[in-house]
Amino acid sequence: MRANSNLFWILGAFFWAADIAYVLWSIIDTGKPEWVGLVGMALTGVLSFFLAFYIGRTRSAQGGDVPQDRPDANVDDGDPEMGQFSPWSWWPFTLGLGLTLVFLGLAIGTWVSFFGGPLAAIAIVGWNYEYYRNNFAR
Amino acid sequence: MDNVSSTSLAPSSAPVINRPNVTQVGVIVWLGSEVMFFAGLFAIYFTLRSTSPGLWEHQTAKLEVPYALVNTLILVASSFTCQAGVFAAERLQARRTGSVLQFWKWGTVEWFYLTFAMGAVFVTGQVFEYANLVTEHVDFTGDSYGSAFYLTTGFHAMHVTGGLIAFLLTIGRIFAVKNFTHKEATTAIVVSYYWHFVDVVWIGLFLVIYVLK
């Protein structure tokens, strides 16, 4: 993950350098900065630095390199418990349907949104507590 | 066997490590995309500001900076109470061990309730601010300043509201289980990541809209 982190540091530096060049160029050309590119590139740099920082912190907290970063690791070294992943669920579909109605309502008539909103709210709660109910209650 | 990278006989030298939490890394990457969403809003604001400076001068004079500053301080303080809740989650302490007033013995639930209340005060404060500005003719469809102001602060307020719902869902998850485990702690931590992000975005918005004008 050191390589991942370094790539994002390099990307961030690149975007900030490109931003400076872009602003200077736009000032030379038109006499004032062009704001969309200025803000866009500056915050793309922020995005990159943010990820570089977090990945770097994650790496230093794990006390070593993950197996996929080590040439001498075996395949089954990278076979731990990865976390909980749902095998299937109807809730994402329900949420998608609810949000579809909300945004459809914004386009064709607000009354449609009032049917989509409650459906989306039910789906959010259902999705969040799917593995906290029934068989999964603990 | 020349084309096989390892065999079951080869002893591994890979050390035992604390593997990165995929949920936390995933949330951070998503927040990176949120940075770009707000980059678009900031770009809208700055572009319109540079094209109509006279309008900006006229409309920003109507902003009540001290009011917004108090609201900002409440939101910033809520990030600290949220982090206190995360520290409790990292101790796997769901509930308080002392009385209600002994906040140093609070668990995640108490800290998150307080954070929720502060976030709710912030959003409520913005609603009153909007109402006040509309009476002073800063309208969403009235001019480009109104559009930029309500788009940026409004999308931020929607994010705060989403965070408030996330706090309630997190508290509900803690109530739903008998034992507070690492899964609930992960939920609390990623919600705090989101909350800190929304807080930092507001600091940016406050500096741009109320200080820089």
Image (tube, helix red, strand yellow):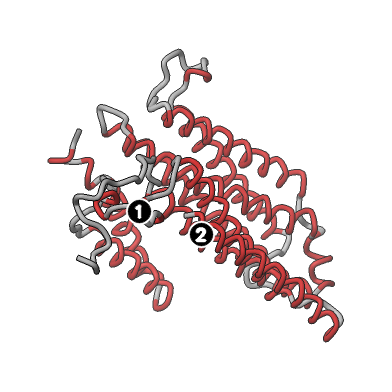
Spot the residue most to the front: B2
The reply to whether residue B145 is visible in this rendering is no
Crowd band around label 1 with a 10 angstrom C-alpha radius: few (<14), some (14–19), many (20+)? some
Say the numbered circle drawn on residue A3.
2
Q: Which of B155/B204 is in front?
A: B204
Residue A49, percent from left and from top? 61, 58
Residue A1, percent from left and from top? 47, 55
Location of mark 1 (residue): A72
Three-letter code for the amino acid on which mark 1 is drawn: Asp
Q: Reading the chain from its start, which is encountered first: label 1 or label 2?
A: 2
Crowd band around label 2 with a 10 angstrom C-alpha radius: few (<14), some (14–19), many (20+)? few
Q: Which of B103/B152 is in front?
A: B103
Left or right: B4 as drawn, with respect to B192? left
Residue B141, by quadrant, is bottom right
Residue B118, by quadrant, is top right
Spot the residue most to the top: B98
Residue in the picture at 60% in, 70% down: B40
